[in-house]
Amino acid sequence: MQTSIQLCKFMGIPIRLHFTFLFIFFAIIFSFANWDQTGTRIPLGLGGLELSPVIRYSLSAIAAVLFFFTLLLHEMAHSFVAMRFGTKIHSITLFFFGGLAMMEDIPKSPDKEWRIAIAGPLMSLALGGLFFLIYLGLKALDPTNYRSVAILVLTIGLFNGALAVFNLLPAFPMDGGRILRALLAKRMSFLKATKRAALIGKLFAFALVIMGFSRDPFTFILTGKWSSNLWLPLLAIFLFMAATEEERATATFALLDGIKVENVMRTERATVPEDITLSELVNAMLADKTTEYAVVDARGDLKGFVTLDAVKKIPNDQRYFLHVSDVMIPYDGPRDALLSDAPASEALKRMLRDRKSILAVIEEAGGGLIGIITKKDLSIYIEMLRGGVRVQ
Ligand SMILES: [Zn+2]
């Protein structure tokens, strides 16, 4: 399902908007227009000002757009540093929580990783400082006429300051978690560093729960009063889950260390001809106990892939006259193929990134099909590695 749309391209990077971003966009407009500042030390909304609805909502829309741009600049800062290290940026997506820069092959070198991770918060901090200076300037100029604009500028400044602080929290998936892991990885293995960083993140999440139920420092900064804040325990649950996920994913990739595609690939029960009917395909699946095949033509050349999912969409009576070539996913060249001596982790990475359940294994000279590697076979292999089963 398509959950995000491409907005534009910036420095060659596609900028995408996730549909959840729309909620936060309108939430910002509404809350900025109506947030009543009475009782807070720092004005964060136009609620207390006498303004016409047109001006009130126009300013709020500007605030939301500025929010969007500063978030984008945060992600661009990560991307810019990563690109300087030669990493390709797939896209930048803005969604409910913030942004995410999708990078191809994040450098495994700790020195590069922490620099990429810290660039975002540094950008937000700089933007926060810049907006705060503009606010001071406006305040000095004329406190009454510029009040609403000053509040807008101050709010964006504070938002960026908060974004920087929040992202420096030492927990996954915050930038701070990655910086922490990279600094630890200078002295230990990547897996061990991930485990240690995840543990620190979980302890931090635990501290947030306690703060949330008793004394929240964030509320104190805004209002000058100590109180509880039940958003913090919610955030803690999110951080706890992210730490667990990061640990699990890293452990899986570490297990595959030294394993090659040829160890996991399958050369038998790997292909079906393109001209058989779907009912013949179903029989092959039942006989072979497999749900994915590479599709080949009469000469044995790779034409595409066919999976059980494709068959499921076709009603039973149509399976007698439709052919494999009618429902197969066409072969997409290098994106769909790996060499047999490539690392197995590369296969897993591509399957996760492109949501594929099967890839072709081809020979280096000529590109002929040798076999297939499927997600199911890979997960069985990982399961065995996890159980300490290795070739003796
Ligand atoms: Zn970031």
Image: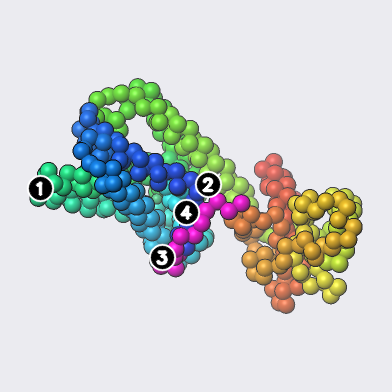
The tag earlier along the polypeptide, 4 or 1, is 4
The tag earlier along the polypeptide, 4 or 2, is 4
In the image, what residue occupies the spot 88% across and 61% down? 321
> Where in the figure is residue 194, as x and y percent of width and height?
49, 44
Which segment is the magenta one? Answer: 1-13
Q: Which residue was labeled with disc 1?
A: 142
Find the distance from the CA under tag 4 to the CA under tag 2: 33 Å
In the image, what residue occupies the spot 30% across and 49% down? 58
Q: Is residue 253 visible?
A: yes
In front of the other: label 4 or label 2? 4
Describe the element under mark 1 as helix, strand or loop: loop
The tag earlier along the polypeptide, 3 or 4, is 3
Residue 191 is marked as 2
The tag earlier along the polypeptide, 3 or 1, is 3
Find the distance from the CA under tag 3 to the CA under tag 4: 14 Å
The tag earlier along the polypeptide, 2 or 3, is 3
Find the distance from the CA under tag 3 to the CA under tag 1: 37 Å
Find the distance from the CA under tag 4 to the CA under tag 1: 38 Å
Q: Are marks 3 and 4 in contact (CB under 8 Å)?
A: no
Q: Is residue 71 magenta?
A: no
Q: Amino acid at mark 4?
A: Leu
Q: In the picture provided, is 348 more to the left or to the right than 363?
A: left
Give the main secondary structure, helix, strand or loop, of the magenta stretch. Answer: strand
In front of the other: label 2 or label 3? 3
For this orientation, the residue located farthest to the left is 141
For mark 1, does the 10 Å Cα neighbourhood hold few (<14), some (14 to 19), or many (20 or more) residues? few
Q: Is residue 12 magenta?
A: yes
In front of the other: label 3 or label 4? 4
Q: Amino acid at mark 3?
A: Phe
Residue 10 is marked as 3
